[in-house]
Image: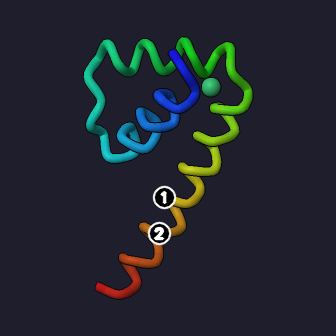
Amino acid sequence: MKCQCASKLISQQLDSKLKPQEKMALSLHLLICPRCRHFQRNNQKLQGILKQYCSKDS
Ligand SMILES: [Zn+2]
């Protein structure tokens, strides 16, 4: 899997849109790729901040 593909899956993962085999392939890639692990961490952090922000408004 290429990093470009992995980062796409990471964004979809945050919306829980991944198929089981995509999740599997992604976690395998994350094992071998520190860059994408970092990307995923940042994404999750951002998502958490956005969620907090939105729940404040509603
Ligand atoms: Zn990667």
Query: Residue at 63% of width from left, 50% of height from top?
Result: 42
- Is the CB of the residue bearing disc 2 within 8 angstroms of ligand 1? no
Neighbourhood count class around disc 1 (C-alpha, 10 Å): few under 14, some 14–19, many 20 upward: some
Q: Nearer the viewer, residue 2 or 47?
A: 2
Neighbourhood count class around disc 2 (C-alpha, 10 Å): few under 14, some 14–19, many 20 upward: few
Viewed as shown, does residue 20 lie left or right of 51?
A: left
Residue 49 position, x and y percent, is 53, 67
**Colour pattern:** rainbow
Asked where in the image residue 24 lies, by quadrant, the reply is top left
Vertical relation: 57 (above or below) 8: below
Viewed as shown, does residue 11 lie left or right of 2?
A: left
- The answer to whether mark 2 and mark 1 are in CB contact below 8 A is yes
Vertical relation: 26 (above or below) 47: above
Q: CA distance from mark 2 to mark 1?
A: 5 Å
Residue 55 position, x and y percent, is 36, 77
In this view, which residue lies farthest toward the right? 34
Residue 2 position, x and y percent, is 54, 21
Query: Residue at 73% of width from left, 27% of height from top?
Result: 34
Point out which mark residue 38 bears: none
Q: What SS does tag 1 mark?
A: helix
Q: What SS does tag 2 mark?
A: helix
The residue beneath circle 2 is 50
In which quadrant of this rendering is ligand 1 seen?
Answer: top right
Residue type indicated by callout 1: Gln
Residue 58 position, x and y percent, is 28, 85
- Is the CB of the residue bearing disc 1 within 8 angstroms of ligand 1? no
Query: Residue at 65% of width from left, 32% of height from top?
Result: 37
In this view, which residue lies farthest toward the bottom? 57
Residue type indicated by callout 2: Leu
Point out which mark residue 47 bears: 1
